[in-house]
Image: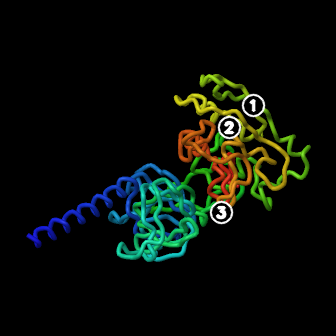
Amino acid sequence: MRRVCIMLLTLAMTLGLLAGLSSGAEASEMKNAIGTVNAGSLRLREEPSTDSDVVATAYRGDQVVVIERQGDWYKVVLNLKTGYMHKDYLELDQVKNVKLGYARFDYASNVRKTPDVRSSVVARAPKNETCFIVGFNKGWYKVSYNGRSGYVRSDLVTMLEIPYTNYGSRGNTYREDGGSAGSTDSSADSGTADNSPRLGSADMIAYQKAMMIFGTVKFRDHRLVYSTPAEALSHMTTITVKTWDVNGSGQKYTRTWGLTVHKNIAPTVQAIFDEIYALPEKPPIHSLGGYRWESKSEHTVGLALDINARENGYFDPDGKLLYGKGFDPANDPYAIPVGGSVDQIFAKYGYIRGIYWRSGYKDYMHYSFFGT
């Protein structure tokens, strides 16, 4: 009887472990290596074939996360997009120090001392909490979470931003006039860069954003392009946007705003608020700001927006509230949920919320085009 009980207990533990693995696999696929592009540029394709549609393009030195190999192709994640790259143009590392940026725990997870399921637990992370990926080790991400360093299996978290090593990479292989150094995946076709898209998009890198807004990348800091308020204002325009708000009786009603932004981002911002206004949940907005002249800020160049500032507070790396009354999206209708519909719309058009900064500061009210 004792042996039967032990067998049943072992089976239960095994099934529990498998359930945990399955739960993580539903959220994300297991990653096996970090790949570095060794060609001038390399296409990411929808399927493992040169006849397949191009999803995005990586450039020499860019890094991707490799999921699996299929023949002569690797299935990879490039800048939050999944597709296929030819194996001949990627150098793989199973152990590497690499800053991939912020990521989300897809469900409650253990952060372990070493990359081993038998290793001691240094922290327990609830579902949807964020961590910062600083390395990779044979299927595990090395992460920083709540001041602790440890490891979590790569299929249990999802990256939230473009890897820091990939920012601005296009400037290394493309000329300012948009000419290409040539793209590779054993296919000879080439594309023409469009440096003046009407709308921003999630797959744009810093180079493309700079060309779209300023028409050049020849500046030290995009936040300091304009030297005076008068110069900055000459590049701004005021658009009319509609949002929802809620009255004292709990009823939603329409508000109309005049919002001042950079003239080259105005169509993008208009599209963002058109989509937010069309959301079935009608998210209420009672505070909205765009351009303002201040030191070293994307507001100064009309590329940042603050929404419901008091309810979407500003915190230091230790969690101390520096501005506003806090952040409580579960109970406050003006607090904008992280990863919710509003965040998704901003991200679709290339905007980044101010909660993923390397400094550890979190500015929940702040959305900016360059992520600063």
Secondary structure found at label 1: strand
User: Residue at point 50% right, 56% down?
Assistant: 104
User: Residue at point 58% right, 46% down?
Assistant: 347
Labelled disc at residue 239: 1
For the residues labelled 2 and 1, say whether their Cβ atoms are less than 8 Å apart.
yes
How far apart marks 1 and 3 lie (CA) works out to 37 Å
How far apart marks 2 and 1 lie (CA) works out to 9 Å
Amino acid type of the residue that numbered disc 2 sits on in the rendered structure: Val
* Category of crowding for the residue at label 2, using alpha-carbon neighbours closer than 10 angstroms: few (below 14), some (14–19), many (at least 20): many
Q: Residue extending furthest front?
A: 2
Q: In front here: 191 or 360?
A: 360
Q: Which residue is mark 2?
A: 269
Quadrant of the drawing holding the C terminus? bottom right
User: Image quarter for residue 355?
Assistant: bottom right
How far apart marks 2 and 3 lie (CA) works out to 32 Å
Q: Which residue is mark 3?
A: 318
Q: How is the image coloured?
A: rainbow
User: Image quarter for residue 134?
Assistant: bottom right
* Category of crowding for the residue at label 3, using alpha-carbon neighbours closer than 10 angstroms: few (below 14), some (14–19), many (at least 20): few
Query: Residue 43: percent from the left, percent from the top?
Result: 50, 58
Query: Residue 16: percent from the left, percent from the top?
Result: 27, 61
Q: Earlier in the sequence, mark 2 or mark 3?
A: 2
Query: Residue 296: percent from the left, percent from the top?
Result: 81, 56
Secondary structure found at label 2: helix
For the residues labelled 1 and 3, say whether their Cβ atoms are less than 8 Å apart.
no
Q: Image height check: is 288 above or below 244?
A: below
**Any part of residue 1 in sight:** yes
* Category of crowding for the residue at label 1, using alpha-carbon neighbours closer than 10 angstroms: few (below 14), some (14–19), many (at least 20): some
